Structure formats: structure tokens, C-alpha cells
Image (cartoon, grey):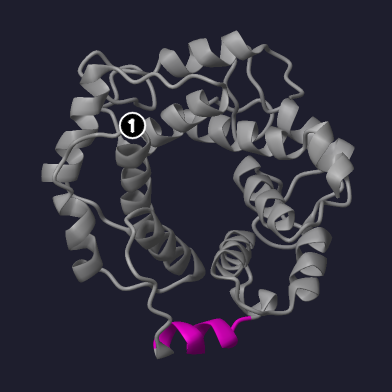
Amino acid sequence: MFLKKGRQKIIDFINSHELSEGGYSLGPYVPPSLEDTYYALQSLLNLGIHRISPATVAYIKEIAEEGSLSYFKLAYHLAILIKKYNIKAKPVMLKSILEKFHPKSASDWYYLIMFKIICGKKIDLNEDLISWIKDQTPEKLRYVTEVGRYVLLMEKLKLDYDRKRYINWLRLLQNPDGGFGPLFKTTSFLEHAYIALKALNSLGSKPIYIRKLREFITTSQAKKGGFGRQSITVPTLEYTYYALISLLILSDSYCKSI
């Protein structure tokens, strides 16, 4: 990977966000969150570290059995952590979320389907889902996060759609600085670069400005080792995760395989 600060610096940054009572947080004096815990542990895995403290295991278990989840993304992240770390818990929250919420966007559908796959549940391609899928275009989905999740969902389900149209739309969204904004000709942010790159990768394609994109990501790395939303921004666990995944996709082996 192309890092200004080395692997150990990033690991130290991540570890500094773990709380003694379990879980990871945005910073000192901030309670732990499931999202920060997910991003921290997934980043460590991508750095070759499969370590989790007993306190963090207890924190995840408590959320699964007693916590409150407000949307599908959190349920998916919780399911991932339970499975990857073989946490023994009665996933009350994972079951109840299917009864409480209904998907309203491409991101909702993506995380719902991914959640079901992780939990070994049957994927029901019902009329609502099929009609919604057929009615979509990149222009209608509009935001890169929605277009990206739609592409990842379609590829996961192995459904037919106009791949070339989505490839062209995503490639044209890239800014001259190498990054991607939420919409055409808007400010580049790391989360949008991440989802655009991940979607293009799933389509067997790549961005137009590879070198510029690498520079955009690496200049988002702070002295502490973590990554921010763009250069000269506060590093967080979330953006560190986005950066690491993006740099893995942009590795030489990936670029040569296209």
C-alpha cells in the first residue's frame, strides 16, 4: 500500500481509540459506538491483526442482546463482528430489525441483503425488490453512494443490468484531483472515493485518474497515522477504514489485473 505513515503508526492510531470498558470511540471522553468498533476491527483485520479484547467482545455481545439498532447498516456490521469473532450471543437485535424496518433506498436494500446472506437467511426476490431494481438508473439514483451500493447489490445477486452505463457514469464522476464527490462536479471526499472505487472494482473496471486517486487518499493521512475525510481534516476510524480498503484495491496487482 502507498502510505505516508507506516503500518504500525496506523495500528497505534486504531488502538488508541479502544476504551478500557470495551468498544472503540471517536475520541477521548466519547462513548463507544458500534460503527467505530466495526471500522476499527475491520481495519485491523486488513492489517493482518485478528485481535479483540474480552471487554470489546462483551460490548458487542451486549449490543446484540440488549442494544437498539436503528437501520440495516448497523445490523449488517453487528452480524459481521459476531461471525468473524465467533461471539456467542443471542442476536435479539438482529432478528427484530427485520420486523421494524423496510428498505427505502439502494443502500437499505444492499445492507438488508448482505445482512441476510451473513445470517444464512433465504434471499427472497419478491415483486417489490424486482420492480424497484428494474426501475433504477444511475441518473435516478443520483448520489454516488446510492449508485455504488446498487452496483454492489446487483453484482452480489448476479442480476442482469446495464453494466456499461454504470461504469461510464462512475468514471465520469471522478474529479481532476482524483477523488469523487457525492454528485457531479462536487467536492471530493474519501467516503465517495471509496464507494466509487469499490463499485468499479466489482464491475471489473477502474477510475480514469489512478495516480491522482492514490494521491488524494494518501494526502488524507494525518501525522497520527489515521486518515481524515480529505487532507488537513481530523482522522477517524471510519475514514481510516475507507482509505485502507481503497489502497488495497489500488494495489499494483489490482491495476495489472484489469
Decide if residue 66 is on the left or right side of residue 36: left
Residue 61 visible at all: yes
Residue at disc 1, secondary structure: loop
The residue where tag 1 is placed is 85
Q: Residue at (54%, 82%) from the top-left corner?
A: 133
22, above or below 208, in the image: above
The single residue placed furthest to the left in the displayed view is 66
Q: Quadrant of residue 212?
A: top right
88, above or below 201, in the image: above
Magenta stretch mostly in which secondary structure?
helix
Q: Quadrant of residue 60?
A: top left
Q: Amino acid at mark 1?
A: Tyr
Q: Which residues are magenta?
A: 128-136
Q: Residue at (19%, 70%) from the top-left corner?
A: 99
Residue 22 visible at all: no
203 or 106: nearer the viewer? 203
Is 241 contained in the magenta span?
A: no
Decide if residue 220 is on the left or right side of residue 91: right
169 or 203: nearer the viewer? 203
In the rendered image, residue 67, in percent from the top left (x then y), is placed at 16, 44
The quadrant of the rendering that contains the N terminus is top right
In the rendered image, residue 136, in percent from the top left (x then y), is placed at 60, 82
Decide if residue 29 is on the left or right side of residue 191: left
In the rendered image, residue 103, in percent from the top left (x then y), is placed at 37, 72
Q: Quadrant of residue 151?
A: bottom right
Decide if residue 185 is on the left or right side of residue 12: right
47, above or below 34, in the image: above
